[in-house]
Image: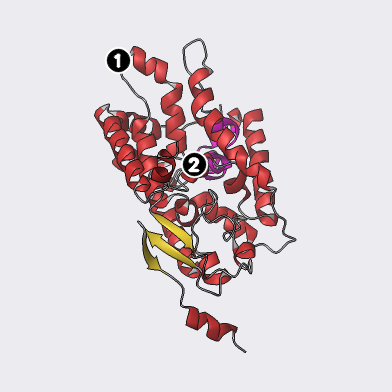
Amino acid sequence: MKRIAPYFKSEKLPLILLTISLILFSIGITLDEPSRVLEQAWQICFSCIGIG
Amino acid sequence: MEFYRKWFQFLAVLITNSYWAFPFTKAIYQGPFKVVCAPGLNCYSCPAAAMACPIGSIQQMLLSVRLSWSNGQTYLALYLVGGMGILGSIFGRMICGWACPFGLFQELLHKIPSQKFGIPRVLRFLKYAILALTVFILPLVVVNEMGLGSPWFCKYICPAGTLEAGFPMLLLQPGLQDIIGTLFYSKVMILIGFVIWSIIASRPFCRTTCPLGAFYGLFKNAKMVKLVLDETKCTKCNECHPVCPMGVKFNESPNDSDCITCLRCMHEGCQFGAISLQLGGIQVHSPDIRKKQQEVAP
């Protein structure tokens, strides 16, 4: 635990998380998730606005 | 700096809501830019919204995950979580302070003259429970006989949806007024509650309820753009406390998850140059102490 703690406080941590996020983002694109997001966002979400 | 931040916030609202043909089309924007998620909380059913809401999109993807998988589509919301993670690891909650439409709305309400109150610190933890439960767990777990869940946060809590989408859509499509019911009125009550609370307390929704703010707050120790405290210059005068719109005591908790990097503590609070702005570990901005000393001197 002592070895891990300073590493998580280092200046590299944002870069590590940014890299992980970019990987997740890229996997999402390869799974065609953006088209699903578009499909949802093009429709009025009635339950979101409290109707229906 | 506060002047520039306000302009930046207005600009962010305009960019996020840049579909101004809605009074003529009577419909929401259905163009390609809606594949991009807005950085702040902005309902994608708002008639002017040109971008998707990350929180709404995550719930929509998770609530239909069983149906998607049965159709051979492996959706895991990684595009959305990854996108929020990219913004979070760079800016953290700076987005709340500079680019969130609902944050700006609360700040404007707080300018209404009235007696002002604080918010109990313990309520800040509520937003993490709301993020975990209403955005991820409940939409995924509680499903109907068809295997579909509900967007719990959007449906039962989100006041931004009522304000930005509920009222405008009722005006644009009057036929919808016939089908509003208890759910709509309960959401209106939640909105009214937050409006009143925002007048008497600073940014109550951001501090207690916002799941997007809670997500960005997870990056408090891992964001590239952040305010840092030089403890050798800090006199512990606590002048940074009252100027913070999020109730952060910066000199006691410089890595606070609620810090929205609005820079008010740096420019309006600290007179000793103890607070500076860093980008990736490099100091990019610190206030002109000499100018401040001249202002303070009689």
Residue B224 in view, yes or no: yes
Which of the two labelled residues, at mark 2 and mark 1, occupies the earlier sequence position?
1
Residue shown at 47% from the left, 17% from the top: B148
Instruction: Locate residue B112: give its quadrant.
Output: bottom right
Closer to us: B178 or B150: B150
Q: Is residue A26 above or below residue B143?
A: below
Which amino acid is tagged 1? Gly
Instruction: Locate residue B129, reporting x and y percent.
Output: 58, 33
For label 2, the SS is helix
Residue shown at 51% from the left, 28% from the top: B151
For label 1, the SS is loop
Q: Nearer the viewer, mark 2 or mark 1?
A: 2
* Magenta stretch holds residue B6: no
Q: Extreme left residue here?
A: A30
Instruction: Locate residue B110: give its quadrant.
Output: bottom right
Label 1 chain ID: B
**What distance separates the C-alpha of mark 2 from that of mark 1?**
30 Å
Q: Extreme front residue here?
A: A2
Report which residue position mark 1 lands on: B72
- Mark identifier at residue B212: 2
Instruction: Locate residue B179, reporting x and y percent.
Output: 59, 28
Instruction: Locate residue B224, reporting x and y percent.
Output: 38, 53
Instruction: Locate residue B237: give its quadrant.
Output: bottom right
Residue B20 in view, yes or no: no
